[in-house]
Amino acid sequence: MLRAAISLRLNQVPKASLSSAVQWSRHSSHASRGTRPLSTLSTLSFSDEVRSALDNKKPLVALESTIISHGMPYPQNYETAIEVEKVVRDNGAIPATIAILDGQIQIGLSHDQIRKLAKLGRGAVKASRRDLAVVLSKKQTGATTVSATMILAHRAGIPVFATGGIGGVHRGYENSLDASADLTELGRTPVAVVCAGVKSILDIGKTLEFLETQGVTVATYGSTPDFPAFFTRTSGFKSMLNIETPLEAAELIAANHSIDLQSGIVIGVPIAEIDAMDDRLVGEAIDLAVRESNEQGIFGKESTPFLLKRVNELTGGNSLKSNIALVKQNASVAAKIAKDLSSLNSRSGQQTRSFSTSARRMKQLHPSSQRPIMVIGGTVVDITSTATAASSPTMLNSSHPGATRISLGGVGRNVAEGISALSGEPCVFVSAVGGQHVEKETESQVSSKEDASDDLFGPWLISELARRGMDNHEIHVVPGARTATYTAVHDATGNLLSAVADMDVFEMLPPAKVKYAIEDNHPGTVCFDGNLSVDCMRTILETCRDRNILTFFEPTSVAKCTRVLDSSLKTLLQSNALNFASPNEYELAAMGVVARELLGTSTDDEAFQKSFSRELNEGDEKQERETQAFLRDAFTVSLFIPTLFIKLGSKGVFVVDRVKNADTDPSLKRSLEKFPAHAVEKVESVTGAGDSFVASVVTSLHQLAHVQPLLSSSDSEDENSTVKKYTGQLDDNVLWKHIHAIVEDGQKAAILTMQTHQTVSSALAHCPQAERVRRQNKLLLTGGR
């Protein structure tokens, strides 16, 4: 239990070192009593293990840290904390010890952090609700009490918390009015607290009355409703009910969340008979300790630590042994409950988080619409080294003076940044970066790691995304993995000599994480790139198809573009689960080969001739550009992806659309058009131009499908209306009514990026398309007025 509450890491990159605990930017949005600005939610820092558990919806158990600093002496406090975390893991959950270290809230502690807190002992501030702001503002180290741990666990989305015993009403309350803040916190924070009841140094009867007044459900885990008394199995008082299995407890917690009671639950676990103390002996020790505390004038938050220490002295150390045993038992029960609760919520599709859902948070970020754009794909650190001298035959065999530039890249990231700039609202970006290894403790208690290296780019990348105004709460950190990098060496003239692309981390993005991100954020359009695994792509297509979400595929490269045409996805593709794609001519050729293999038969020449008869028979310059092979590839790929925006570089853009609601055979009916390239006066770099084009097109399609229908003044479906009510597909007539504007905007976005050295031009935020999008969103916000 000692490893209790140190797990809440509030989104700040540690000043000292990028290799310190990477933060996670999942913003717990607003508490039950009102909305907090996002800036106040930026201080929770999560350990890699806890962050990964949250990302993958694994069961978590919060643990407090006051028991480490104030509950036991060193080294028993450190040893117990490590053992309690092990108990949680052994029973199928992830421990999340919570504390404040040097003004930083930590959700999940390393062994070194636990040892530091254990050695500091009472030098750490005993932090209850009232103390949190003070400890944070003064950058102190604080050990969280039950009440503070509940608050921070609630913010982190951890619904189950294990501790030794809760605080309560002190003996002589009628004179001192001394009652623990734990009781009022239980009345307003929806976290289930698994404990050995109320500490027997307190007035248990009055404590239970207080909890009843606060509306707190109190249950005993076991065969009877006898409420436990910490060191002993019974207190002489009854709980309102008894629950006999972890599943029963999980169902109780789920019911509490389902009706949004906003109050906690106490689950009292009687100490095991073998570890329980003699009622008379411990009672006498407690009575003496209470008298001594009164005589010495010890009250408030110093009272409980004094009483526990004195009782331990009076019992010859036996009470400490019982304390350690009950903490471990509570951790075991809490882990089993958390595991069953996770399974319950997984089956029902319910949220287990006790903080406001991402949908509410996204509504704050996207006041104009509850359906944002989501981008799922690669985020890469580009490292470019340029030698001072021109290339020579021996250049690759030696070192040379030059300059190195580090920048952000990655197709998915570039597209997400472009969409955010054009829409004025952060799109949801789902990706993966590397992170720190989870530390393990050897038998000799010497900290060791599975691997010698920790990723340094992950934390920097996450913070840089936030600095650029991009939403990064769905970034998945893979402990021990390497953040994707593209390392290139150029000679003085800019010619590429060699490059290494390390993209393995994207294979580690869990499909379950992707599915949860889509369900949690409820996007209207999802764009994904070719960096993802086939399993991730399948999850995206299935989830979006089931929820009427537009899908757009950016192929990324010739090597990766065919993943979306994997044979396992054939049925999904034939059901129009993928709506749009944006290959270049080389990617289209590769996709055409695989698409023909996927069909299993030769392409129907008659259907092909009918679809492209005009283009094949014109015999002009257009026929020279768009060869029969190119058109055949476009025809075949469009059988699986209805609408293709084919990027031809200096030759422009070719759009092919298989009309999905045609009366005739849909394989025969197509709309297509060639758009010439725009002249560019000055090209600084073509890097990112294609991604800016995609960002613009995706933004246009999203606005057309999800925003404009809502701005329609008519509730009726006018047959001649350009804009239809959104039904999960973008009507072909609507698309072609606006196709010129869509491509024109895309080409202009690409040009803006080509005219800079930026991967995505900052000028996108001020271009005419961005102004139109903002006007539409403003109209939507005001109901079209």
Image (spheres, rainbow, N blue to C red):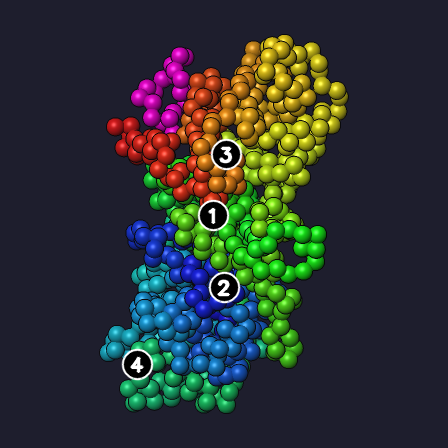
Q: Residue at x 53, y 74 (%)?
A: 112
Q: Residue 297 in the image: x percent, y percent?
A: 28, 86
Q: Earlier in the sequence, mark 3 or mark 4?
A: 4
Residue 341 rendering spot, x and y as whole percentages: 53, 53
Residue range of the region highlighted in magenta in the rendering: 705-725
Q: Looking at the image, tell me whether mark 3 or mark 2 is earlier in sequence order.
A: 2
Q: How many marks?
A: 4
Q: Residues within 10 Å of mark 1 (few under 14, many from 20)?
A: some
Q: Residues within 10 Å of mark 4 (few under 14, many from 20)?
A: some
Query: Does residue 350 appear left or right of residue 261 in this picture?
Result: right
Q: Is residue 281 above or below residue 777?
A: below
Q: Which residue is mark 3?
A: 694
Q: Nearer the viewer, residue 29 or 213?
A: 29
Can residue 713 be seen by looking at this rendering? yes
- Residue type for callout 1: Gln
Contact? badges 1 and 2 (CB < 8 Å): no
Q: Residues within 10 Å of mark 3 (few under 14, many from 20)?
A: many
Within-10-Å neighbours for mark 2: few <14, some 14–19, many 20+: some
The kind of residue on which mark 3 rests is: Val
* SS category of the residue bearing label 1: loop
Q: CA distance from mark 3 to mark 2?
A: 32 Å
Query: What residue is drawn where x is 53% and y is 33%?
Result: 552
Q: Amino acid at mark 2?
A: Leu
Residue at label 1?
351
Relative to 746, is 483 above or below? below
Would you say the residues marked 4 and 2 are in contact, meaning their CB atoms lie under 8 Å apart?
A: no
Q: Are marks 1 and 4 in contact (CB under 8 Å)?
A: no
> Dominant secondary structure of the magenta stretch?
loop
| Mark 1 or 2, nearer chain start | 2
